Image (tube, rainbow, N blue to C red):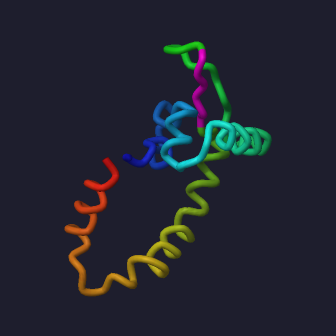
Amino acid sequence: MPTPRWCISPRPKDRQLRMSALAAAIDVSHSGITRLASRLEAQGLIRRVRSTEDARGYHAILTDEGFARLEKVRPTNLASMRRHFLDHLAGLDLKKLAVALRSTAT
């Protein structure tokens, strides 16, 4: 499954994702994503709005404050990924690994 675009895009229009798609992307239940979204919304990091395409669904929209928080933690997150994962793959062709991992995600 591709990375949600709002996780990487600075453009406000790209910072939203349907709640059910977000739940699938991070492998949590619908009730789990609802609880998580409630906490994030209370902190001002996201807003939830009813879908204009389907009145039964909602979208999570990353706020400017949420995007700023994401940008702030990105270096630490990337350093951790490198230290705990990528550094252990010395000698492997990372481009081939990326292709292999992408094929298992679909």
Q: Is residue 14 above or below residue 51?
A: below
Q: Is residue 97 above or below residue 61?
A: below
Please state the horizontal and vertical placement of residue 22, each as a whole percent of the image. 53, 40
> Residue most toward the right?
42
Q: How many marks?
A: 0
Q: Nearer the viewer, residue 37 or 64?
A: 37
Residue at x-position 79% and y-position 40% = 42
Give me the residue at 64% from left, 46% from top: 66
Up the image or down, 51 lies above or below 71; here it is above
**Residue drawn at (66%, 29%), measured in percent from left and top?**
48
Q: Main secondary structure of the magenta part?
A: strand
What is the magenta range? 56-61
Looking at the picture, does residue 3 appear above or below residue 60? Answer: below
Q: Position of residue 65 (x, y in %)?
A: 67, 45
> Magenta stretch containing residue 58, yes or no?
yes
Q: What residue do we see at 33% from left, 82% from top?
A: 89
Q: Percent from the top left, x then y, of residue 28?
A: 59, 47
| Residue 41 location (% of width, % of height) | 73, 39
Q: Quadrant of residue 74?
A: bottom right
- Nearer to me, 32 or 96: 32
Q: Is residue 41 left or right of residue 74?
A: right
Residue sitting nearer the eye, 60 or 66: 60
Magenta stretch encompasses residue 93 = no
